[in-house]
Amino acid sequence: MQNIFKNKYLDQKKLVKDHFYYLVSNFSELNQKQIDNLSINIVKNAQSYKAGSPFSKLIHEFSLTSNEGIVLMCLAEALLRIPDAKTINDLIEDKIPIGDWKKYIKNDKDLFVNISSIAFLLTGKIVQEKVEENKNILGKVVKNLSGPILRNAIKQAINILAKQFVFERDIKKAIDFSNEKKHDKYTFSFDMLGEAAVTYEDSDRYYKQYEQAIIETGKGKNPHKKSISIKLSSLHPRYERNKLDLLKKELFPKAYKLTELGRDNNVDICFDAEEADRLNLSLFIFKEIIESKLIDEKYQGFGFAVQAYQKRAFFVLDWLKKYLNEVNKKINIRLVKGAYWDTEIKIAQEQGFTDYPVFTKKFATDISYLACAHKLYENENIFSQFATHNAHSISYIKTLFKDRDFEFQKLHGMGDEIYSYLEKDDNFKCRVYAPVGGYKDLLPYLVRRLLENGANTSFIHQLKTKDFDILKLVQSPLTKIDKLDEDKIKKPIEIYGDRKNSKGLDLSEEDVVDSLKFNGKFKDIKAYSLINGEDIKSDEVIDIKSPHSSTTLGKKYFADEKISEAAIESLKEYSSKWKNFPIEKKVEIFLKFADLIEENTNDIIEICAKESGKSIKNSIAEIREAVDFCRYYSKEALNLFQTQTLKGPTGELNQYRMIGKGLSFVISPWNFPVAIFVGQTVAALITGNVVITKPAEQSSFAAYYIIKLLLKAGLPNNAIALLLGDGALIGKKVINDKKLKNVIFTGSLETAKIIQSTLQQKENIPTFVAETGGLNCMIVDTSALTEHVVKDVVNSGFDSAGQRCSACRILCVEENVYDHTKHTLIGAMKTQQVGNPEELSTDIGPVIDTEAFENINNHIKKFDKVFQIDINLNQGNFVPPTLIEIEKLSDLKNEVFGPVVHMLKYKASNLDQLIEDINDLGFGLTLGIHSRIDKTIDRIVEKAEIGNIYINRNMIGAVVGVQPFGGYEKSGTGPKAGGPEYLKRLCHEQSISNNTASMGGNASLLSEVED
Ligand SMILES: Cc1cc2nc3c(=O)[nH]c(=O)nc-3n(C[C@H](O)[C@H](O)[C@H](O)COP(=O)(O)OP(=O)(O)OC[C@H]3O[C@@H](n4cnc5c(N)ncnc54)[C@H](O)[C@@H]3O)c2cc1C
C-alpha cells in the first residue's frame, strides 16, 4: 500500500506521461477506428433520442456560470426543506428576479424548460397556458410573489425535478419498480439516500435503512441482479483518518455486518468512494473485510468504487492486483471518475497541501479512467463495473473488454440517451444506480448531480450544447496531452500570487500521522528571557506544566525589574540602526524566519500541544498563520517602505516615506502562542521598531523557542528582547519608559483598559493597538441547512476549547427550526472527543489553567437549561462542551472564554431587533450568518457593527491577508491584523523637502530647457 500512500500528490504530468500514456496510446492506435465509430454512433443515437428527461433539458439550458443556473441550484437545494411559508416566499422573491429568465423562453416545444424559466411554474393553471402566453407570466409572477399558489407551484416544480432522480420512496417500492418489464435490460444498485451522518442518531438510522434494504432486496425476485450502494460517511459521524482507533471499534464492525448481511441474502454490496482524505481509511476497512471469512467462493459480491480523478486510483488498482492474487479472493470494482472535484480543489488550497490529490485537467481524468480500465482488465480477481456516461470512455472500454465479462453502470435519470444505443447488444449489461428515499434527503445528492453535470467540461453537458462538434466531443483525451503544461489552476502554494501560501500537513496521510507521534524530545525544557540574544537566568523559577496532565515539562525563568530595565537599555542604541536597516534586508530575515518555522513544524506542534494544550490540528493552523503573517507583512512592508518622490515646483526634491518609531512593546496571549506572538512581533520589527516582546506567562517556552528561530534567521540581537514573566511587573517598567512609541496588545478587555489608562499618564502619546475579546453571535434563519449550521457551530464554539476571541458564543436560531437545530447540535456535541491534545484523535483539549477552569464552571452554574457531554477525565483542566439556553441576549454581559455556546430563540419578524441587540452588546468582533436568502444576509450585514462577518461557514480561523481580523468597540482598536492597514499604524510618516537649487542654482532646469 506504500505506493498508494506516497503518490497522493504526484505531479500530474509525470503521472500521465510515465504511467498512462503508452498504455492508452498503444491500445488507441490499434483500435482507433472501432472506438471512434462506436462513439459517433452512440452520440448520433443520443441526438435522436426522444425521451429526453426534464432534468437533462434543464442542465443544458442553464450553464452553471449563469445567474439562472446558480438560482436553480439554490432553489433546488433549499426549497423543499424550509418549514415556514414566509421564508419560502422570501427565498423565491430573492432568487427568481435575479435571472434573465426571458432569454430562455423560446418558441420550440420544450415546455419544461420554458416553464422552469418562468419560475418553475410547471403546475396549476399556468402550465395549461400556451408557451407564447407564458412569456408574459414572468411579470405576473414577480408581482404576485407572496401568493400561496405560486409557492406551491414552484415547490411542485422542484418536486418534479427531484422525482427525476429518486427511483422510489422506499426500498419495497423500488424493488417492485425495478422488476417492471420496462427495466428488463438493466440491473440495479439501490442507494439509500442520505449524506454524511452528523450525529450517532443519524448513523444508526442510516445503518437500519441499509440493513432493511439488503434484507428486502434479498427477498425480491432475482436478488443476485440487485445490489446496495453504501456510503461509509453515513455510517459514522466521524469518518475521518484521525479517528482510526475509534472507527475500528464503531465503524469497521458496521461495514463488516452489512457485508455479512449481503452474503447471507445473496445481495451485492458496493461501498461508494468519497473524499480523497478518506481513501486510506476506506482501504483499511475493505482490506479487513476481504481478508475475513465473508469473502470466499460462495460470495463474491463485495466491492467498492475507485475514483479515476484521484492520482492514486492507478496505484490502488495496482495494489489490488497483487493483493487479491495473494489472498486469492474475488471482488467487484466500480470505476468512476469522481464526484467531488471542486471540493478537493478547495480543500487542497485552504490546507496548503503540496499539490492536488486529483487531476486538474479533465482530459487527464479521462486518460486515467482508461489507464485504470487496463489495470482492471489485467486483474482476473475483479469483476469490473464502469460507471460513466461518456461515449468515448464507454467505446474504449467496450473495445478493450470485448473478450471479458464486465458491466456498465449509469445513474437513474441520466444517460438513458447514451445507453439506449447499446441496449440492442446481446451481451449488454448495465446497472442503474438508483437513489431510494424521501425528497428531503435527495437535495444534497441533487445539487451534486447538477454541479457535476452542469459543468462546462462534463460530457453530458457538452452533448446537450447546441451545434456541438461531434468529432470534437468524442475525440480521444490523448489529443490534448500537450495541454498538460498549460494549467490554469495554480498549485495550492501559489494561490496568493507574489506571496507563498503556508504549507499544511495532510492529517489523512500515513507518513504524517506517523511523524506526529511525539518521542519525548521536549522534556526538561528551559525557557529564558533573551537580551542581546543571550539567555537570562533569574531567581524566579517556575515549573512549566501541561494544562492536561500533572507532568512537569521543565522550568521557566521570569524576569524581574532589573532584567526588564536591562532589556530596554539593550535596544536603545540599536534603535536608529534598525530604523535605517534596508527594508529588503529586513524582508530577507523575515522570509527566512517563515521558512525556519515551517522547517520546525513538528517541534512547534509538540510545544503547542504540551505547553498550551492545543490540539494537533489547531497547532498546525497556528503555525501556518504565523508563517502567513511573516510573508504577508514582508510583502506589505516592501511596498510601504519605498520612498516616494512627490510632484512639486522645480528646484526642490520632495520625498515622502515611512520610518520606524522606536521602542515598541508587544504583549501577546497564550491562546495563540505562536501565531499572534509572531504576527505582532514581526509587524513591529518590520516597520523599523526595536521590540520588547512579552508573551503570556503560560506560553513562555513557545515564545523562547520562536525568538531563537528569529535570531537564527538573522535578526540582529539587539533589535529584540524577550521578557518572560509577570505582565503587570514587566508592563509597568516598559510602558513607563520615556522612549516607548507603540504598544501592541492582544488579550483581555480588562488588561487593555489598564494599559490604556497607564498610557494616558504619559507625556507623549504612544500608539496603542489592542485586540480584545468578543461576545460573538451566529444568526440562523429557517432557510439554512441544519447539518451545515451544526458543523459550523461545533467548530466555531468548541474548537480550541472555545479559547478563541472569534469563537461563537451565542447561537441565535429562528423559532421554527430551533428545536431541530438544538437536537442535532447536542447529537453532534456527543461526537466530540475531549482529552489529551497530544493525541491526533482529540478534538478538544483542556482550558489553559485552573483559574480559567473555575471561572467557566462558575459561569455555567448560573444557568438552569444546560447540556453538557460526559467526559470521564479525572485530571487536567477539562471543561466538557456545554450548551446553555438563554432567554435574552442581555443574560450575558461578558465573554466566557471556554467551550460554552449559548442558544437563543428568535422570531423572524424580530430580526431587526436581534441585530440591534447584538450591536448593543458593545462588542464587534465576529458574526456568523446562516441563510440562503441574499436579502436577509444583506440586511444583517448592513446593520451589524461587527468587524468580521462570516456567511454560511464557520466563524473562526481568519486567514492572514484573506480575512483581515479585528473588531470594534470593546473588541479592540483596530487596525485589523493581517490586513493592509496594520503596518501603517506602527510607523511614522516623514516628509523631506530639499531645496536642491540652494547650492549652485537650478542647473538641471537650465540643462533640460531647449530653445
Ligand atoms: C453508477 C454510478 C456510480 C457512481 N458512484 C460514485 C462514487 O461512489 N463516488 C464518486 O465520487 N462518484 C460516483 N459517481 C459519479 C461519477 O464520478 C460521475 O458521474 C462522473 O464523474 C461523471 O463521469 P462521466 O464519465 O460520466 O462524465 P465526464 O463528463 O466524462 O467526466 C466528468 C468528470 O471529470 C472530472 N473533471 C471535471 N473537470 C476536471 C478537471 N478540470 N480536472 C480533472 N478532472 C475533472 C470530474 O470528476 C467529473 O465528474 C458515480 C456515477 C455513476 C454513473
Image: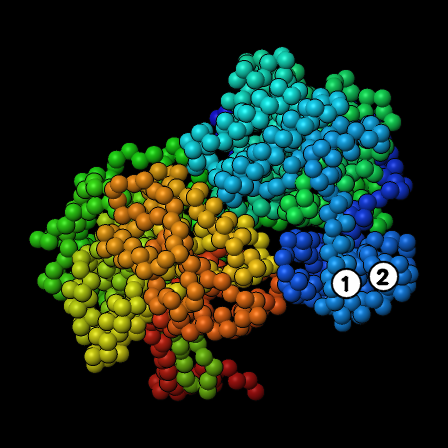
* Disc 1: which residue: 149
- The residue lying furthest to the front in this view is 864
Label 1 amino acid?
Ile
Asked whether the viewer can see residue 594, the reply is no
Please say if 638 is above or below 596.
Answer: below
Rounded to the nearest whole Å, what is the CA distance between mark 2 and mark 1?
Answer: 9 Å
Question: What is the quadrant of residue 749 in the picture?
Answer: bottom left
Q: Number of labelled discs?
A: 2
Helix, strand or loop at mark 1: helix
The residue sitting at 43% across, 67% down in the picture is 888
Toward the viewer: 881 or 340? 881
Q: Is mark 2 within 8 Å of ligand 1?
A: no
Helix, strand or loop at mark 2: helix
The residue sitting at 57% across, 34% down in the picture is 207
Local crowd size for mark 2, using a 10 Å CA cut-off: few (<14), some (14–19), many (≥20): few
* Disc 2: which residue: 125
Q: Is mark 1 within 8 Å of ligand 1?
A: no
Looking at the picture, how far across and down is residue 896, in whole percent? 34, 60
Q: Is residue 492 left or right of residue 481?
A: left
Question: What is the quadrant of residue 744 in the picture?
Answer: bottom left
Label 2 amino acid?
Lys
Looking at the picture, how far across and down is residue 81, in whole percent? 64, 53
- Looking at the image, do the residues carrying marks 2 and 1 touch, with CB atoms under 8 Å apart? yes
Looking at the picture, how far across and down is residue 587, in whole percent? 37, 58
The residue sitting at 36% across, 82% down in the picture is 994
Question: What is the quadrant of residue 361 in the picture?
Answer: top right
Sequence-earlier tag: 2 or 1: 2
